[in-house]
Image (cartoon, rainbow, N blue to C red):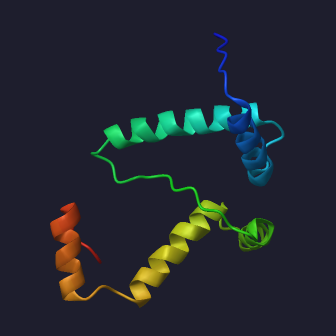
Amino acid sequence: MVKMTLTFDEETIETLRSKAREEGFMRPSLLVRYLLLRGLKENADAELEETDNKTIPVKVDNYRELLGYVQEKKMGSVEFLATFAMGQYMGRFPLSETQKRRVKERYGIEAGR
């Protein structure tokens, strides 16, 4: 492993401290490491255009409640619940033909399959 040192001005450090507390990190250096690695992973994911998998960070205020629900229903993970719920919603409220056409034009995919 290689150690790297980053230097920030005091204003940036204060911003990082505040954001780290807000995001649940003990130290701003951990937040910076997380953001850096996440950014690298997202860039690598973007290069893999042949797959339709994407990780989306979503902030929820009731994570423990969702986790408890998932565990009791034996659904596997909160991520699976979110994917399942989005699929259910999309099935219940499908796109119109015009909306499907726009999705196909923008992204080159058939929407609402």
Name the one closer to the observer, 4 or 108.
4
Q: Residue at x 71, y 38 (%)?
A: 11
- In the rendered image, the vertical position of residue 82 relative to residue 34, given as above or below: below
Q: Residue at x 77, y 48 (%)?
A: 18
- In the image: residue 42, left or right of residue 94: right
**Residue 93 found in image quarter:** bottom left
Name the spot of residue 15 as percent of width and height, x first.
Answer: 71, 44
Name the spot of residue 24 as percent of width and height, x first.
Answer: 79, 49
Count of labels in the image: 0
Name the one closer to the observer, 29 or 90.
29
- In the image: residue 25, left or right of residue 107: right
- In the image: residue 106, left or right of residue 33: left
Quadrant that contains the C terminus = bottom left
Q: Residue furthest right?
A: 26
Q: Residue at x 16, y 77 (%)?
A: 101
- In the rendered image, the vertical position of residue 6 relative to residue 39, given as above or below: above
